Image (cartoon, helix red, strand yellow):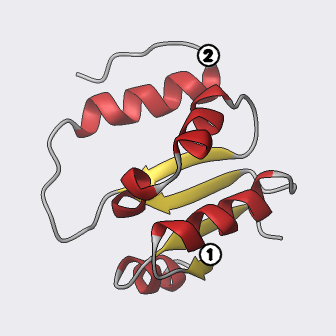
Amino acid sequence: MSNIIGIAVQPLALQLKLTGMEVFEVSDAEAAENALEAVLDTDTQAVVVDERLRKGLSLRMQHALTQRKGAPLVIYCPEFDSEASGTDSYIASVLKQAIGYEIRLD
């Protein structure tokens, strides 16, 4: 498997594929959860998941992802066509999980 894998619905799936990463194109959160379960126990280093799929994940999976330490790092990616607020705080929280330190992005 690739070091970085994407799990997304269209059009984000296509955008991620254009970067060269391996992408599981899914239609709903249930399919995304199945793909996540398949990827979590591999040597993959990072999984980029479509933000729109996050709320549809089961409570069990959401809890497992928040408690998970080490690789793969799960990163939620918003749609590129919408302006996201709070991007700095989101990036800081992802980095804190990855490196174990809280940083400030000013």
In the shown orientation, is residue 40 left or right of residue 14? right
Q: Position of residue 26 (x, y in %)?
A: 52, 80
Q: Quadrant where the N terminus lies? A: bottom right
Seen in the picture, residue 25 relative to 104 is either above or below; the reply is: below
Seen in the picture, residue 26 relative to 78 is either above or below; the reply is: below
| x 46%, y 13%: residue | 102
| x 30%, y 23%: residue | 105
In the shown orientation, is residue 34 left or right of residue 31? right
Residue farthest toward the front in the current orientation of the protein: 59
Q: Give the number of the disc on residue 100.
A: 2
Q: Quadrant where the C terminus lies? A: top left
| x 74%, y 50%: residue | 45
| x 66%, y 52%: residue | 46
Q: Distance between the residues labelled 1 and 2?
A: 26 Å
Disc 1 crowd, CA 10 A, few/some/many (<14, 14-19, 20+): some
Query: Quarter-wise, where is residue 56 in the image?
Result: bottom left
In the shown orientation, is residue 65 left or right of residue 84? right
Q: Is mark 1 on a helix, strand or loop?
A: loop
Query: Quarter-wise, where is residue 11 in the image?
Result: bottom left
Q: Is mark 2 on a helix, strand or loop?
A: loop
- Front residue of 59/8: it is 59
Residue pointed to by mark 1: 21
- Identify the amino acid type marked 2: Gly
Query: Quarter-wise, where is residue 73 in the image?
Result: top right
- Identify the amino acid type marked 1: Met
Query: How many callouts does the rendering have?
Result: 2
Seen in the picture, residue 7 relative to 63 is either above or below; the reply is: below
Disc 2 crowd, CA 10 A, few/some/many (<14, 14-19, 20+): few
Who comes first in sequence, dot 1 or dot 2? Answer: 1
